[in-house]
Structures are given as structure tokens and as C-alpha cells.
Image: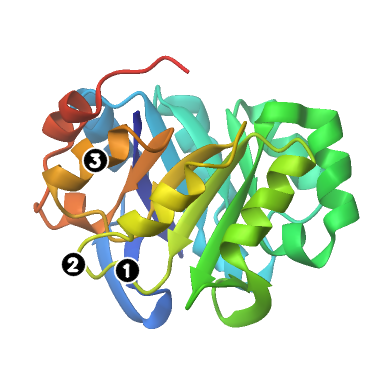
Amino acid sequence: MIIFPAIDLKDGKVVRLHQGDYDQMTVYSEDPLAVARTFKEAGATHLHVVDLDGARGGNPENFKVVERLIQSSGLEVQVGGGIRNWERIETYLNLGAKRVILGTVAITDPAFLKEMVGVYGEAIAVGVDVKDGLAAINGWEKTTAINGVAFCKALAEIGLKTVIYTDIAKDGGMQGTNLEVYKELAQIQELNIIASGGISFEEEIIELKDLVYGAILGKALYSGILDLANCIQLAGRSEK
């Protein structure tokens, strides 16, 4: 299982939100590249980056910061947040991003998603952010009527390879993740699931290792609850 330490960006700074609430934000660093380099020193090979300003408003407000992370961190970067058109996908991939994550547009424009999967293949991922079982969009500020697990099954059917599944209620709470939903998602054939939201305990890393392709670690790293190097060792290294 791949461990993806996370960098969430707002106004160029490294922040964490509590359950997606922009009014409950903690700033951890004003130097995202320095944070990424500490992750690399701890043994990370991959990095999960989200432009929170982009996710909320649809514009790549932190583009220059993301560019530096892609080109200078020494990590394989997957990036999301406000990526809602072909030009932005192309731009990030040309910069060297390993994978781009579509969120809102994957729900609002399924034809576009299918086209992008056809063109870019495994370089396209979808972020499925779920509140009370239902997918949310626009930086988690609006909940749809779409069942999250059913949506993941539909994504596999169109040939998508990677889903980042976040239980919003768990995110930032440091009370543990939703292991039961990952057990369910693990049954979907041909779909790589990256677990996100609330992972806080080493025991969860061990259990997730047998269920999912990857795990995103955020607040638990920044708060010191989890040690990145130890989590990478527990997860086992993967070169996928």
C-alpha cells in the first residue's frame, strides 16, 4: 500500500480543515515545499496535493505553489482541487504530475469524465467525497443525492482506475477512519481505492494494507499522532 502524505493549500499555505469546514482551519506552514521535502526525508515517494481555493471556487489559486511541488519536491504528485476542464488537466500533466484528481466535474459532467479517462487513462483519478453516504461537490459545500459506493462502481464500469474516497465526517477528526466502507469498496474489481479521511492509528494502516491501494495521511501527521516513516514501514513499500 502506498502512503500519500497530504498537503492542502489555501492562500499558498499548508492548512488542514476539520470535516471540510473552511471556518475550522489550522495553518501548519507557510512553506509547502519545505513540508514536502520533510516527507521525502521520512521515506515518502508520493504526495497528495489539494488546492482548497480551487476546489471551492473552481480557479487554480495555488497554481504556482503546486507547480513547485510537482517539479521540485522529488515526489510523485497527484493533485486535485478545481480541475474542471481539459486545459487544466493537460497543464498539470505537462508539469509532471503523476495523476490529476477530478471531483465536482466527475459528477456534474459525466460525459467529460468519460472522455478524459479515454484520453489520459490511469493519469485520471476521481475524488469521491462522501457525507452521510452521499457524494459532495464544490469543496464539500454541497451534497448530492448520489450514493458514494454506487458511484464508485459506476466509475469502474467506465474504465477509471483510481478513486480517492473520503468520508467527510471522519476527515480531520483524528478519531479513526471508516474501515467498513473500505471493506465494501475493496470488492469492486479493477478499481484502485485510496483511503482518505481520519486515518489516525497504526492499526488502521495495518488493516487498510490488505484492503486498498493507498492511504492519505493528513492531520494525524501534522499533529504528531502518526509518524510518517513508521507508517510507510507498516504499509510496505510499493512501486505501483
- Residue 36 coordinates in the image, percent (x, y): 32, 37
The residue lying at 84 percent from left, 57 percent from top is: 110
Q: Give the residue number, with chain letter if any, for mark 1.
A: 170
Asked if residue 73 lies left or right of residue 68, the reply is: left
Asked whether, in this view, residue 175 is left or right of residue 2, the answer is: left
- Mark 1 vs mark 3, foreground winner is 3
Left or right? Give the position of 186 relative to 83.
Answer: left
Residue type at tag 2:
Gln
Going by the picture, which residue comes out furthest to the bottom?
A: 23
Residue where numbered disc 2 is placed: 175
Instruction: Choose the circle earlier in sequence order: 3 or 2.
Output: 2
Tell me what residue is drawn at x 51 percent, y 27 percent.
71
Instruction: Identify which amino acid the numbered label 1 is placed on.
Output: Lys
- Name the one closer to the observer, 139 or 122: 122
The amino acid pointed to by label 3 is Glu
CA distance separating discs 2 and 1: 7 Å
**Residue to which mark 3 is pinned:** 207
Q: Are marks 2 and 1 in contact (CB under 8 Å)?
A: yes
Tell me the quarter of the image containing the N terminus. top left
Image: 82 above or below 134: above
Relative image position of residue 18 (x, y in whole percent)? 32, 74
Q: Is residue 83 above or below residue 187?
A: below
Could you give the CA–CA distance between mark 3 and mark 2, rounded to whole angstroms?
Answer: 16 Å
Label 1 – label 3 distance at C-alpha: 17 Å
SS class, disc 3: helix
| SS at badge 1 | loop
Residue 222 seen: yes
Q: Earlier in the sequence, mark 2 or mark 1?
A: 1
* Label 3: how many Cα within 10 Å (few below 14, some 14–19, many 20+): few
Residue 17 % position (x, y):
35, 71
Q: Nearer the viewer, residue 36 or 143?
A: 143
